[in-house]
């Protein structure tokens, strides 16, 4: 089989799938139309299909004709609560919802890869699980894993793709080790004593305390943390006050701590120490809580090499970027990489002439659809490289 020719023959179908998903986006776990299309497509390919995992997740199992290992190929499915500003003929028809992160393309690429691999399943050694995951934007992977998708049969490894608008089309980005950051979201509620703005000495001002907390945390980043271990702490939401003449009773602040290393627990501890000591100094009290968004996404070295090997057959080695690729954005594929050898990589979609270089989560985000066949072929080649690597032979 010529994989490139097989993908090229399905390019129109690949694009149509992506555009349909883009036009009818759904959020979180509420992916009823999306998951129905995915499940039906996989069944038509002859795969064993499990529906309703983590509410609307779907898994398709391709059983090869020869015994061997099992590899997961994963796609996320959920859109974002953003009003689309593109004027595309297939722009979102669902008000306030759009695919602004590339998940529409992820689904289309994996479906076409499943169709092609299923066509040649009698020549495949081992099994391929096609995992379509809900709620990536709020960490749905762990729920699917807890519901058993790594078993029956046991998954030995996993690959994942993210279409990436900071990399040019026809280029691939991957590094071994940390590639996407852990993210922990914090919420601080500072309790003071309200009063008149003209008599602050009779109050306990939570705003003054909050300002000092922000300044102290910024100092912590620049003076306490190793600059060679990337860490970003951002305050993104502040809520307090109702009037220019009233000192409020409390102040709420929210943000995130992101780390490209394994010391997130220490940073949260130090963060808490600073917050509580400043509150004490300002005669306030506080409630501090953390929520895990994503754990650190680490790429396995051997799996990374397999991605590079597969990529060289599609875009050539000079178009595989293997430095300055890691980002402080989170991705819950990390739940797979924490449990089994995995590799997560970026497929470029940036083309300024086509307007596909907007950042992710932007209301004008769009995909250079010439990248879709690259992603589909990468899925196929990575699966085959892995399943054939135990005896240095690929059965396809």
Image (cartoon, rainbow, N blue to C red):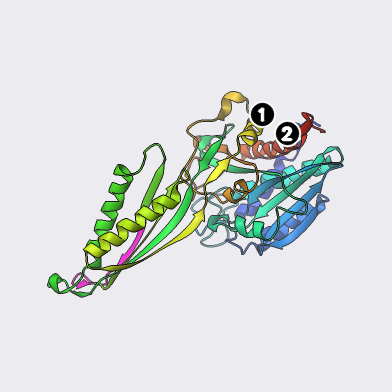
Marker disc for residue 309: 1
CA neighbours of label 2 inside 10 A, class few (<14), some (14 to 19), many (20+): many
Residue 112, above or below 281 = above
Residue 268 position in % (x across, y down): 40, 54
Q: Quadrant of the N terminus?
A: top right
Question: Residue sitting at 60 percent across and 34 percent down?
Answer: 301
Residue 274 position in % (x across, y down): 30, 56
Indicate yes or no whether the magenta region holds residue 28.
no
Magenta stretch, residue numbers: 236-247
Task: Judge left or right: residue 231 versus residue 125.
Answer: left
Task: Judge left or right: residue 133 versus residue 216.
Answer: right
For disc 2, the marked residue is 385
Give the SS element for disc 2: helix
Q: Tell me whether circle 1 and circle 2 mark residues in contact (CB < 8 Å).
A: yes
Whole-number angstrom distance, CA of label 1 to CA of label 2: 8 Å
Q: Quadrant of the C terminus?
A: top right
Task: Judge left or right: residue 351 versus residue 274.
Answer: right
């Amino acid at each position: 089989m010529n994989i490139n020719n097989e993908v090229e023959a399905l390019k129109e179908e690949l694009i149509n799938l992506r555009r349909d998903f883009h036009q009818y986006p759904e959020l979180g776990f509420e992916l009823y139309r999306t998951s129905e299309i995915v499940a039906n497509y996989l069944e038509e390919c002859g795969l064993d299909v499990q529906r309703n995992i983590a509410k609307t997740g779907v898994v398709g199992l391709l059983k090869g004709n020869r015994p061997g290992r099992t590899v997961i190929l994963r796609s996320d499915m959920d859109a974002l609560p953003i009003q689309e500003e593109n004027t595309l003929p297939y722009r979102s028809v669902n008000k306030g919802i759009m695919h602004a992160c590339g998940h529409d393309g992820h689904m289309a690429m994996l479906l076409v890869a499943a169709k092609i691999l299923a066509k040649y399943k009698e020549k495949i050694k081992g099994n391929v699980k096609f995992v379509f995951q809900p709620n990536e934007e709020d960490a749905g992977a762990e729920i699917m894993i807890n519901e058993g998708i790594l078993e029956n049969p046991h998954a030995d490894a996993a690959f994942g793709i993210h279409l990436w608008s900071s990399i040019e089309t026809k280029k691939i980005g991957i590094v071994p080790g940390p590639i996407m950051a852990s993210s922990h979201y914090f919420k601080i509620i500072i309790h003071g004593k309200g009063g008149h703005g003209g008599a602050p000495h009779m109050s306990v001002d939570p705003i003054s305390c909050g300002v000092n907390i922000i300044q102290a945390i910024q100092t912590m980043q620049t003076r306490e943390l190793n600059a060679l271990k990337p860490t970003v702490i951002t305050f993104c939401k502040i809520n307090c006050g109702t009037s220019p003449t009233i000192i409020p009773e409390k102040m709420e602040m929210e943000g995130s701590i992101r780390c490209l290393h394994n010391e997130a627990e220490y940073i949260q501890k130090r963060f808490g120490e600073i917050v509580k000591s400043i509150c004490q100094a300002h005669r306030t009290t506080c409630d501090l809580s953390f929520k895990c968004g994503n754990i650190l996404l680490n790429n396995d070295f051997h799996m990374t090499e397999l991605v590079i090997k597969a990529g060289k057959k599609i875009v050539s080695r000079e178009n595989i970027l293997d430095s300055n690729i890691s980002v402080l954005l989170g991705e819950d594929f990390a739940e797979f990489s924490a449990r089994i050898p995995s590799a997560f990589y970026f497929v470029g979609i940036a083309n300024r002439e086509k307007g596909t270089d907007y950042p992710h989560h932007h209301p004008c985000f769009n995909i250079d659809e010439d990248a879709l066949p690259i992603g589909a072929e990468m899925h196929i080649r990575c699966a085959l490289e892995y399943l054939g690597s135990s005896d240095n032979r690929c059965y396809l």
